Amino acid sequence: MPLALITGANRGLGLEFTRQCVRDGWKVIGCCRDPDAATELAGTGAEVMKLDVTDAADIAAVSKRLAGTSIDLLVCNAGVSGSRKPVLDPVTQAEFDEVMHTNVLGPMLISAALADRVRQGGKIAYVSSRMGSIGAMSSSGSAIYRASKAALNAAVKAVSLELAPRGVTAIALHPGWVRTDMGGAGADIDAATSVSGMRAVIERAGPSVSGHFLDYTGKELPW
C-alpha cells in the first residue's frame, strides 16, 4: 500500500487530496495544526498527525516519528493567502511573516526534514500558484502571496536538483482557481476537479519534469 503524507490536510485542497488518496487505496498521513478540531480529516480514515509547518519542533517530532518509514508521495499543501494589498501599499511585519513563514519557510523545513523519508523514485508535490509566476503576472494585488509563491517555486527547483541523484521527482503545481476558503465561492473549479487533475499530473511526472511548474491539467507555466 503506497503512503502519502499531506500537509494542511484538514480543509480545502489538502482534505480533498486525503479523501481521494484514501479512496484509491493509499495509506495517508494527514497533517494539521490542531488534530482535535480536524473532525472531517479524521473521518476520511487517514492517520491524523499534528504538524504546524512553521514550528521547527513539530517538524522534528514528525521526522522522528517517521524514522524508518518510506514515503511514496509528500504533498506540501499548507498555505495562507494573507493580505490582498498591492505591492506599494504598506504591510506589517506580522503580515509578511505569516505568509512567508507558512508558504516558503514551512515547505523548506518539511523538505529538509522529510526528503530522506521519500523513497527512491518517490515524488514531492508542492502546491504553488500561477500567482507566483513572474512571466504571467498582469496585476499587482496580493503582492506578499505572489512573492511567497515565486520564492516557493525557486525552492522547488533547488530541491529537484538536490534530489535528482536519488530519482525523486519534485514539482510545483498550480491547482487552478478553486472554490475553497482561500479561492472563494466565485472560483472556476471545485476542489475535486483540481485535486483529481493534480493527482493525474503527479502520477505522470517523472525525472524529465522534475523541477518544473505545471498546472492541474499538466500545462507547463512560465516562471
Image (cartoon, rainbow, N blue to C red):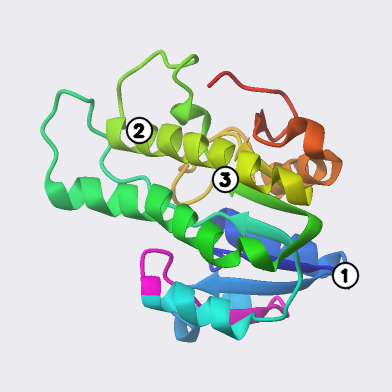
> Which segment is the magenta one?
42-56
Q: Give the residue at mark 1.
A: 25
Residue 186 disc label: none
Relative to 218, does residue 3 appear above or below in the rendering? Answer: below
In what element is the residue under mark 2? helix
Nearer to us in this view, 50 or 167: 167
Quick one: label 2 or label 1, which is nearer the N terminus?
1
CA gap, disc 3 and disc 2: 14 Å
Badge count: 3
Q: Residues within 10 Å of mark 3 (few under 14, many from 20)?
A: many
| Nearer mark to the viewer, of 2 and 1 | 2
Residue 147 disc label: 2
Residue at left offset 49%, top offset 34%: 154
Answer yes or no: is residue 49 visible: no
Residue 222: quarter of image: top right
Three-letter amino acid code at the position of disc 2: Ala
Q: Main secondary structure of the magenta part?
A: loop
CA gap, disc 2 and disc 1: 37 Å
Three-letter amino acid code at the position of disc 1: Gly
Q: Residues within 10 Å of mark 1 (few under 14, many from 20)?
A: few
Residue at left offset 36%, top offset 70%: 55
Residue at left offset 55%, top offset 54%: 77
Q: Is residue 53 magenta?
A: yes
Three-letter amino acid code at the position of disc 3: Val
Q: Is residue 190 magenta?
A: no
